[in-house]
């Protein structure tokens, strides 16, 4: 019984050490990749331009808009100064071209042509984020805002669009995605439901939050926001660590568990050394009495 308790303690200690190590790797990696605040794009990084202009295959079904059209607009620039802070301006002529391309395909076709290789981390690399400009991507999360955009004198009636809406979707890891779309979801999507954003990556934009902070997010231009089959609850710390940990850390975890199991099995099945035979005691020395 004592060996079983000792073996259990050793295994729990080994697993605890592995979890702590992976948690450290996860936090260290987040500081490098995402800056001081996890899940946010550093504003200064949005102005980094790629050294090589990316090219795209016009026959690729995921490439709805050629990136050369969108490269004329710089990420998070130009800026308009408002009372709340600096907000990125979007060229409405270019936006009209993207909206027209989206209007020419159905929602089902749009979802069928999604490039599943595109992930949120692609927005952190200057060259990679320009390679995916104009490509159809898809992100899931909670719909935190959906409102009609005040365009002033600008309109898109020439391409058959009466209204333009904007909003944000936040995924389970707390990362934000801004969007424009021209159709309301029917029925409306509540925050407790899963919102699916399928559209074209336009560029990074910057705008002030209600707290006065500068937030940089990818801008996705879409037809609408659809409801997913279920709401994706935030992942546990263990799941986030496993998802973000590099491959070598996963291998180290498996090796550590295997070593712990091997150690416990060795401890349990170790043969006890036989006790050495005792030498027989010799005759007692005679006892003298008196002088």
Image: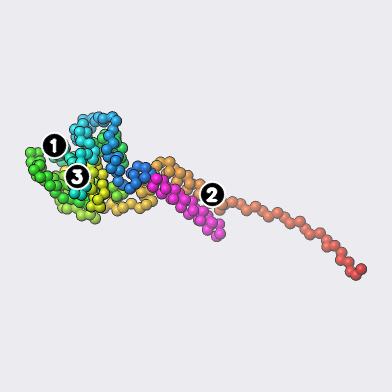
Q: Which tag, 3 or 2, sits closer to the chain's start?
A: 3
**Quadrant of the snapshot with the C terminus:** bottom right
* Residue 6 is a magenta residue: yes
How much space separates mark 3 and mark 2, taking CA atoms? 64 Å
Q: Which tag, 3 or 1, sits closer to the chain's start?
A: 3
Q: Residue at x 27, y 34 (%)?
A: 49
Q: Which mark is residue 81?
A: 3
Q: Residue at x 20, y 49 (%)?
A: 84
Q: Position of residue 125 (x, y in %)?
A: 31, 37
* Mark 2 closeness class: few <14, some 14–19, many ≥20 residues within 10 Å: some
Q: Nearer the viewer, mark 3 or mark 1?
A: 3
Examine the image and state in which quarter residue 216 appears.
Answer: top left
How much space separates mark 3 and mark 1, taking CA atoms? 21 Å
The secondary element bearing badge 3 is classed as: strand
Q: Which residues are magenta?
A: 1-28
Q: Position of residue 190 (x, y in %)?
A: 20, 54
The secondary element bearing badge 2 is classed as: helix
Examine the image and state in which quarter residue 113 appears.
Answer: top left
Q: Residue at x 25, y 52 (%)?
A: 211
Q: Position of residue 50 (x, y in %)?
A: 28, 33
How does the figure colour the protein chain or chains?
Answer: rainbow
How much space separates mark 2 and mark 1, taking CA atoms? 68 Å
Q: Position of residue 156 (x, y in %)?
A: 10, 41
Dominant secondary structure of the magenta stretch?
Answer: helix
Residue located beneath label 2 in the image? 263
């Amino acid at each position: 019984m004592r060996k079983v308790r000792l073996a259990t303690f050793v295994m729990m200690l080994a697993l605890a050490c592995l979890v702590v190590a992976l948690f450290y790797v996860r936090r260290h990696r987040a500081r490098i990749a995402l800056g001081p605040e996890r899940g946010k794009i550093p504003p200064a990084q949005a102005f980094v331009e790629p050294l090589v202009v990316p090219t795209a295959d016009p026959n690729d079904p995921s490439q709805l808009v050629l990136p050369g059209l969108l490269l004329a607009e710089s990420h998070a620039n130009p800026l308009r100064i408002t009372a709340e802070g600096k907000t990125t301006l979007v060229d409405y002529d270019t936006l009209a071209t993207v909206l027209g391309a989206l209007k020419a395909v159905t929602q089902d076709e749009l979802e069928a042509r999604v490039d599943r290789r595109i992930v949120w981390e692609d927005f952190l690399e200057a060259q990679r984020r320009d390679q995916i400009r104009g490509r159809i991507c898809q992100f899931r999360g909670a719909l935190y805002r959906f409102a009609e955009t005040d365009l002033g004198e600008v309109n898109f009636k020439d391409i058959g669009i009466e209204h333009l809406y904007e909003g944000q979707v936040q995924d389970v890891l707390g990362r934000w995605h801004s969007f424009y779309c021209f159709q309301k979801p029917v029925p409306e999507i509540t925050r407790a439901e899963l919102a699916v954003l399928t559209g074209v990556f336009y560029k990074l934009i910057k705008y002030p939050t209600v707290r006065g902070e500068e937030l940089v997010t990818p801008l996705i231009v879409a037809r609408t926001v659809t409801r997913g089959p279920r709401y994706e609850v935030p992942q546990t710390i263990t799941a986030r660590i496993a998802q973000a940990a590099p491959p070598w850390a996963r291998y180290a975890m498996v090796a550590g568990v295997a070593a712990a199991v091997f150690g416990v099995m060795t401890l349990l099945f170790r043969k006890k050394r036989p006790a050495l035979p005792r030498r027989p005691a010799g005759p007692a020395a005679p006892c003298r009495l008196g002088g």
